Image: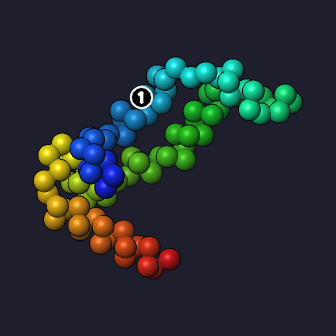
Amino acid sequence: MLKLWQVRDLFTADTFFSKLHGGSYDWEDLRRLVRASERVDSEEILATIEARFAVLRLLTALEQQVIADARSGKNETLAERLRAEIRTLAASR
C-alpha cells in the first residue's frame, strides 16, 4: 500500500479482481512454458490468484486511510504510521 501511496495510485480490491477476471491473457504463451503433459486451465489459474490475494480485501483501517490519501500523497504522517507498523510486524517474526 505504501508503494501505491508513493506513486499516487488509488487501489481498490474490487477493481483489482475485476481487472483480473476481465483481462485478456495470452494463454497459449503460458502453455508453451509448461510441460506438454500439464494442462493450463485459465479458470483454475484465476481462482488460485484470487484465493492467494484475498488478503487484499482485508485491509486494516490504517491501510485504508493510506489508500484514501493516495491521490494527494500529502499525509506523510499516515504513511509513517504504516511504515512503523510494518517494521514492528517484521521485527516480531
Asked which quadrant contains residue 17, the reply is top left
Q: Is residue 39 left or right of residue 46?
A: right
Q: Height in image: 69 above or below 38?
A: below
In the image, residue 90 lies at what x, y percent?
Answer: 44, 73
Residue 30, compared with residue 91, is above or below; it is: above
Residue 47 in view (yes/no)? yes
Please name whichever residue, 20 or 44, is drawn nearer the observer in this view of the structure. 20
Residue occupying image coordinates x 23% and y 67%: 80
Q: Residue at x 64, y 26 (%)?
A: 42
Query: Relative to 42, does residue 8 appear above or below in the rendering?
Result: below
Relative to 56, is 5 on the left or the right?
left
Residue 64 showing in the rendered view: no
Q: Which residue is mark 1?
A: 18
Q: Answer few, some or many: residues within 10 Å of disc 1's Cα (few below 14, many 20 plus, some between 14 and 19).
A: few
Number of disc labels:
1
Q: Position of residue 93 (x, y in %)?
A: 50, 77
> Of all residues shown, which one is farthest toward the front?
7
Residue reaching furthest to the bottom: 92
Residue displayed at 75% across by 27% down:
32
Name the residue at 49% across, 46% down: 53
Residue 15 placement, left or right of 10: right
The colour scheme used to paint the residues is rainbow
Q: What amino acid is found at the position of numbered circle 1 in the picture?
A: Ser
45 lies left or right of 14:
right
Residue 38 is drawn in which quadrant?
top right
Query: Mark 1: which secondary structure?
Result: helix
- Image location (x, y in percent) of residue 64: 26, 52
Give the residue furthest to the right: 37
Quadrant in the rendering for residue 30: top right
